[in-house]
Amino acid sequence: MRLLLILFWLAVVAAVLLPLLRRVRLSAARPRRALPDELVKDPVCQTYVVKSRAVRRTEGDEVRYFCSVECARRAAGG
């Protein structure tokens, strides 16, 4: 009778712990991603800004990045 009780509890513990261990192992095995963004230099005020948050202006084929709308206006001469 004790053996059946011990086996029952071992099965319950295994049923609870195995999925948790799989999740931990899978999350540890995932490679870490590099930072997806880069810094760009504002040509007007010479500050650096994260590319995804920069104000973009296109002139022909060239894309210029600015830290603010004000700097973009200054570059355009207005």
Image: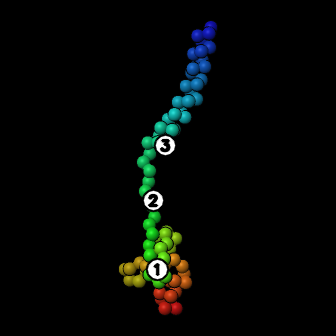
Q: Residue at x 44, y 45 (%)?
A: 30
Q: Which residue is mark 1?
A: 46
Label 2 packing within 10 angstroms: few (<14), some (14-19), many (20+)? few
Residue 8 falls in image quadrant: top right
Instruction: Please tell me which residue lies in front, 6 or 47.
Output: 47
User: Which circle marks residue 27 in the picture?
Assistant: 3
Q: Residue at x 47, y 73 (%)?
A: 48
Q: Earlier in the sequence, mark 2 or mark 3?
A: 3
Q: Label 2 sits on what residue type? A: Leu
Q: Which residue is mark 2?
A: 35
Q: Position of residue 29 (x, y in %)?
A: 44, 42
Query: Does any portion of residue 57 appear in the rendered image?
Result: no
Q: Position of residue 42 (x, y in %)?
A: 46, 78
Instruction: Please tell me which residue lies in front, 34 or 46.
Output: 46
Task: Identify the secondary structure beneath mark 2.
Answer: loop
Front: mark 1 or 2: 1
Task: Identify the secondary structure beneath mark 3.
Answer: helix
